Image (cartoon, rainbow, N blue to C red):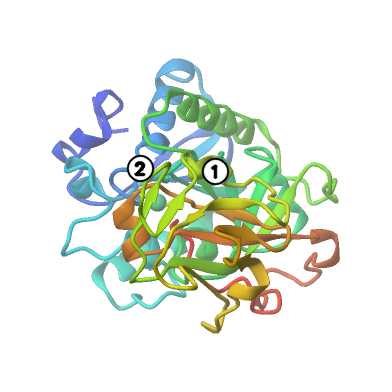
Amino acid sequence: MPAGLLDLPATELHKVLHGPALIHLQGRNPQPLFVTVLQHGNETTGWEAVRQLLQSHYEYDQLPRSLSILIGNTEAAQHRLRRLDDQLDYNRCWPGGHHEDSDLGKLFRQVTDRARSLAPVAAVDIHNNTGLNPHYAAINRIRPEFLRLASYFSSKVVYFTMPLGTQSLAFSRFCPSATLECGQAGEVHGIAHTMGFLETCLHQSEIPATPVDPQAVHLYHMVATVRVHDDAFFGFGHVPTDVAFRENLDVLNFQELPGGMSLGDINGGPAQPLIATDVDGVDVTDQYLRFDRGHIETVRAIMPSMLTLDRRVIQQDCLCYFMDRVHFEDHIEVTDHDPLPEAIGRSDRPGEPRL
Ligand SMILES: [Zn+2]
């Protein structure tokens, strides 16, 4: 560990690290836990958890197992940004993505090969998100050891096979891997929760591949992306806009909503103010929502995720995703690690999660 590095917050790492850095710390069990932090420069919980864990518990004691730490985008972290304008998104540059020929893609190929040669017990990639979301894990393969790893962090687990080029997808070919979404950056309980999770992983002799209790893990996948119609003026709370969403709409993230629930009032504007599209971009709004009674109303049970109150995100990206429960007992992979599985009915691909 470079001297003094653990004293630096994410915004100052650039003073020591002039690019991505891979650090190996030797522990009693040589098989490492592979931890990735700061792929997105403003998502600081991972680095805070790693440095506080090492400072508080292992300054003098030997680690129970080796730890490989990849520190990602220190340049963007300096500016508290996800990435700089002239940079690729780090978490799209891993093997299997569309940027394998970029400088970063080549570097991450080297990192992946190096990691693979170390046979990590597991790999975790630590992120934050916007809006009010519970902590959850995301996995790319439905195998008991992946579900188990995710369950150490949260009972809420999302399965995804798109976008390509994410670290957890690349590493899923040779070890249990997960992306952790640790709430909003800077939250103290997110750092504490992540530290506890890392501690748990460090003390496991392996990630068991025995069956996971379906009650212990609730697995979801995306079935639709929901956007606001370009011509619909929208606001939150009691406002005279075409669409007046419920105040605190984002408290509904990861809540299983019943059919017949109102997400807000409609005062005018387009007849169909929200548009839900499936994997093929087909308009499937009718399957989930109705607008004919002065409200935005669910027509069936559904679970939203990534609901945000950030107007810019809503306009540039989307309002939210709709998710359905996956009964993973019916989808457990029985093959070896290669090749990667197909998506479940391809219906987990309507949008790219903001990982
Ligand atoms: Zn991220």
Report whether 279 appears left or right of 106. right
Residue holding disc 2: 43
- The answer, for residue 60, to whether it is visible in the render is no
Quarter where residue 268 is shown? bottom left
Q: Callout 2: helix, strand or loop?
A: loop
Of residues 214 and 292, the one nearer the viewer is 292
Q: Is residue 117 visible?
A: yes
Distance between mark 1 and mark 2 Cα atoms: 23 Å
Q: Residues within 10 Å of mark 1 (few under 14, many from 20)?
A: many
Figure quadrant of the C terminus: bottom left
Residue at (46% x, 28% y) in the render: 191
Dot 2 surroundings within 10 Å: few (below 14), some, or many (20 or more)?
Answer: many
Asked if 60 appears above or below 240 in the picture, the reply is above
Q: Which residue is tagged 1?
A: 32
Q: Identify the residue at horizontal 58%, vertical 44% (top origin).
A: 252
Closest to the observer, 176 or 179: 179
Q: Position of residue 152 (x, y in %)?
A: 67, 38
**Eyeballing the image, is 142 above or below 31?**
below
Residue closest to the eye, 190 or 209: 190
Q: Amino acid at mark 1?
A: Pro
